[in-house]
Each structure stands twice: as C-alpha cells, then as structure tokens.
Amino acid sequence: MQFFLYEIVARIVAIYLCVDCFRKVRSGLVERKITACPHSTGILDIIVDSLAGLSKRVVHKDTAPVQYWLEMGLQTFGLLGCAGVAMFGWFHPNT
C-alpha cells in the first residue's frame, strides 16, 4: 500500500512540475526572456528567497543569450524528466 501511495504522489508532483516547466519554456520562447533559477549557496537561502519573492532575476535573450539558453535547456531537461516520471512512474529496484 505504501508503494502505491508513493507512486501516486510522485506522479502528481511530476505532473505539476511538468506543467510549470512547460509554461516557463513556452513563455520564454514567446517573450524572449525567462526567469532564472536561484543560484544561492544553501537550501535555506533558496527557500527564504522564494518565499520573500527576492529571486526573480529575468534573463533576456538579446542581452544575455548564453544564460538564456542555459536556463531554457535546464527547464527543458526538467520538463522531459518530469514527463517521464509522470508517464512511467517512479523506479524502485527490487531488493
């Protein structure tokens, strides 16, 4: 029963993250800008900044094309990974 609940939770979280990544990639291609991921040193800094709304750094395609395409690549990689988990489930090896 516990394995079944893990599968359901993993797929729900993966679907949410998949939709979020798709929205970021689509708006990044249309608007030619994307919100960069926070590059803080610790997990506590990331959580506090995201709750306070301080980590909203926007990268424009015309002014910083390398950073823009890196962010687009990271979001696309996250989109594909989340889509894989949503379709096939979370892998648990047999022990």
Image (cartoon, helix red, strand yellow):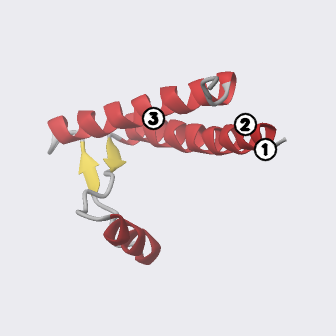
Q: Residue 17: x percent and y percent?
A: 57, 43
Please tell me whether mark 1 sits on a helix, a strand or a loop.
Answer: helix
Residue visible at 32% across and 71% down?
A: 45
Identify the image quadrant of residue 62.
top left
* Relative side of 43 to 64, left or right: right
> What residue appears at the point 64 percent right and 45 percent down from the top-left corner?
13
Labels 1 and 2: the sequence-earlier one: 1
Residue at figure coordinates x 66%, y 41% from the top left: 10
Q: Are marks 2 and 3 in contact (CB under 8 Å)?
A: no
Q: Please name the residue that numbered disc 3 is placed on.
A: 78
- State which mark lies toward you, 1 or 2: 1
| Of the two numbered discs 3 and 1 in the rendering, the one whose residue sits closer to the viewer | 1
Question: Is 91 on the left or on the right of 45, as rendered?
Answer: right
Task: Work out whether mark 2 precedes mark 3 in sequence or the reverse, and give the earlier one.
Answer: 2
User: Percent from the top left, x then y, of residue 5?
Assistant: 78, 44
Q: CA distance from mark 3 to mark 1?
A: 26 Å
Going by the numbered disc 2, the residue's amino acid type is Glu
Cα distance, mark 1 to mark 2? 9 Å
Residue 2 circle label: 1
Q: CA distance from mark 2 to mark 3?
A: 19 Å
Q: Which residue is mark 2?
A: 7
Label 1 crowd (10 A; few <14 / some 14-19 / many >=20): few
For badge 3, the amino acid type reads: Gly
Viewer-closest of 18 and 26: 18
